[in-house]
Amino acid sequence: MRILLQDDIGRLVEDASPIRRLLSDIKGRLPEETIESLEPAAYIESIQTPVFRALRHMADRAQLAKTQEEADSYKRRAQEVHQRINFLESSRPDIVIDRLKRRRAELAKEMEQVTKDIAAEEKKLQELPSVIAGLKQERQNLACEAIRLRHHISEVPGSANDDQRVLDSADQIRQRPIAAIDAFLGL
């Protein structure tokens, strides 16, 4: 019976018939105090609804915390992308091109290398609007995902303390017979 009582509380409140059968078989061989301790566990299904509700609430709270963490992550990433966009929009790649053009005029023997540098910078400048557009789209997607996740966050009824009290109560019902069995067996 001790092994049966140590089973998962969710399974125990679902079907305690093996405990009842065993209790019925050994009832006449145990002291009355031990039987009194075992009987509530034999009918533990009577608190099935509050135990299942408490277990569901605990799982919901864990999922809620995970979703909140995920939403916060999307929000942080959206803010980081926003900062990158602001940096790129405020940068002045034209200055690099102007400086390189002046250097080309002053240093004729480095003309070939400077011309290559100018071409590379101009290419970057041409790609900048598409990079910014892509980052803006990414920022929008991240912000939408954060909003979507926040809309799916719902409150869990009751409190974690209430649910824990229900689970603790169910566990006490289960632990009393175990202690009685141990006391009876001298363990």
Image (cartoon, grey):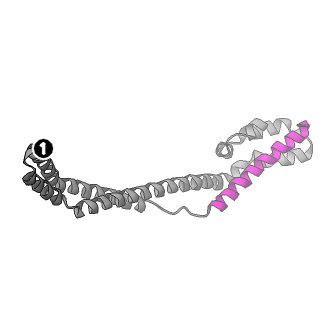
Residue corresponding to mark 1: 113
The image shows residue 49 at horizontal and vertical percentages of 63, 54
Image spot of residue 55 (x, y percent)? 61, 52
Image quadrant in which the C terminus is located: top right
Left or right: residue 10 compared with residue 76? right
Q: What stretch is highlighted in magenta?
A: 160-187
- Please indicate, yes or no, whether residue 58 appears anywhere in the rendered image: yes
User: Where residue 61 sits in the image (x, y, percent)?
Assistant: 55, 56
Counting labels gives 1
* Residue depicted at 18% across the width and 55% down the height: 128
Q: How crowded is mark 1: few (under 14 residues within 10 Å), some or many (20 or more)?
A: few
| Position of residue 2 measured from the top left corner of the image (x, y, whole percent) | 79, 37
Does 45 appear above or below 64? Answer: above
In the rendered image, residue 184 lying in the magenta stretch gets the answer yes
Residue 53 sits inside the magenta stretch: no
Q: Which of 57 and 132 is in front in this view?
A: 132
Q: Is residue 1 among the parts visible in the rendering?
A: no
Q: Residue at x 58, y 56 (%)?
A: 57
Residue 35 appears in which quarter of the rendering? top right
The quarter of the displayed image where residue 4 is located: top right
Residue at 73 percent of width and 40 percent of height: 6
- Nearest to the observer: residue 30 or residue 130: 130
Would residue 166 be found to the left or right of residue 65 on screen? right
Quarter in which the N terminus is drawn: top right
Q: Is mark 1 on a helix, strand or loop?
A: helix
Note whether 149 is above or below 16 in the view shown.
below
**What amino acid type should be assigned to the residue bearing mark 1?**
Gln
Magenta residues, dominant SS class = helix
Q: In this view, does 151 lie to the left or right of 139?
A: right
